[in-house]
Amino acid sequence: MAHLKSGRGAALGLSLLAAALGGQAAAQPAPVKVGFASDLTGACAALSEDGLNGAKIAVEQLNARGGILGRPVELIIRDSQTKPDEGAKVARELIVDQKIDVLTGVCSSAVMLAESAVSGELKVPFYAAIGSTQRGNIELFQPYFWQTQANATMEAYAAAEYVAKKPEWKRISALGSDYEWGHTSVAAFVERLKQLRPDIEFAAPIYVKVGETAMAPYISATLNTRPDAVFAPLFGPSLGALLKQGPGFGFFQRTNLVTLMTVDTLQSQGASMPASNVYGIARAPFFALEKTPEFEDFVTRYRAAYGEYPTDWSINAYDGLLFYAAAAEHAGSVEPDALIKAVGEVTVDGLREKGLKVRAFDGQMNAPVYVGKATKVAEYDFPILTEVEKFAGEPLMPSVEFITRARAAAK
């Protein structure tokens, strides 16, 4: 009888232990789900991978300090293949099936607009940390969207401000990617530069298929316009091909190039970067940012994890997720409407600079733009931008009046 009683006691003890453990498991808070729907294949693959790496570092750091609102952060990744229809498809799957709390990750501006439409329809917050067309903020703005980097118009304005200070540049050509971002950037650049320098002549713009690497016809056509400088909103394979094939045509002896020159492009060019006449627009060049303890820690973590310096895309993705976390903490919730209200109220010190905030009217962050000269230096085995000029974000942001008129015209 004593043995039987002991067995019953042990069974009861095991039952109580199981119940306690089950209660502990039940008490674990549900994760905050971040849907990372990005262009991991296609023309945007390299940029998206860097962005994903930065987001992973942010998730690790957030979870190490207790997550968001005491809840662990979970990154759910999907490939939009740099295709708008696929981007819309995976965004819908993440929202409807995975029940994500926020959507991000996209690179291509065209894919960004497709994902933003799904976000607005299903009323789930969506922020862009790479894709940058201003149409997401202006003509196609929806209230659950915000950008955490300068949009395409702001970057083009910064480029125009920089070019305007070169009095010897009197004739300008444009060579852009033949999709949303390229056309938007060229139009904004020309508009701003005409205001700043009425004396400048502009050749008709030339557009290149996204991902094009056979650049000879475009190089020849551009040089035939006899430009003092070429504004080239290109990225990825097309930009790399221009930098490599241009010297064969004497491109960098005959003109100056002003283009998107982020860290990944500088790294990929290495010693083959043309020695002169290349000027770069950047979003978050690590070598030009303030060396705060937070910045130094991020760079150390990133290099340990990936064996290279962080690119603009990884820094922007990191800043973007930390900004979202700050907004959620401010709201005390990740519920969409409360979260979006907080997005327009918080101010965050990021890796790029202190005082990052989003204007609620158009979901645009006051992120800075950097422009400098591509130069080979002793400290790195790839060129960096030197003589960097930092353009504050707010003066580059289109006015509320301008946006109101643009939205009305688009209806």
Image (cartoon, rainbow, N blue to C red):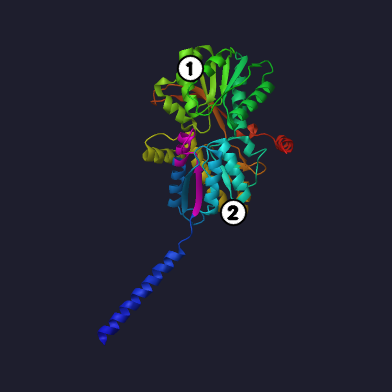
**Kind of residue sitting beneath label 2:** Ala
**Along the horizontal axis of the image, is 40 left or right of 232?**
left
For label 1, the crowd category at 10 Å Cα-Cα, with few meaning under 14, some 14 to 19 and many 20 or more, is: some
Examine the image and state in which quarter residue 151 appears: top right
Q: Nearer the viewer, residue 42 or 376?
A: 42
Residue 28 percent location from the top left of the image? 45, 62
Residue 234 percent location from the top left of the image? 53, 26
**Kind of residue sitting beneath label 1:** Gly
Earlier-in-chain disc, 2 versus 1: 1
Assess whether residue 233 is covered by the magenta stretch: no
What residue is shown with label 2? 331
Q: Is residue 400 above or below residue 30?
A: above
Q: Label 2 vs label 1: CA separation?
A: 51 Å
Q: Nearer the viewer, residue 207 or 290?
A: 207
Q: Is residue 39 visible?
A: yes
Q: Which residues are magenta?
A: 32-52
Q: Which mark is residue 46?
A: none
Examine the image and state in which quarter residue 131 appears: top right
Q: Is residue 349 visible?
A: no
Q: Nearer the viewer, residue 370 or 190?
A: 190
Q: Nearer the viewer, mark 2 or mark 1?
A: 1
**Along the horizontal axis of the image, is 74 left or right of 136?**
left
Q: Quadrant of the N terminus?
A: bottom left
For label 2, the crowd category at 10 Å Cα-Cα, with few meaning under 14, some 14 to 19 and many 20 or more, is: many
Q: Is residue 44 above or below residue 125?
A: above
What residue is shown with label 1? 246
Q: Quadrant of the C terminus?
A: top right
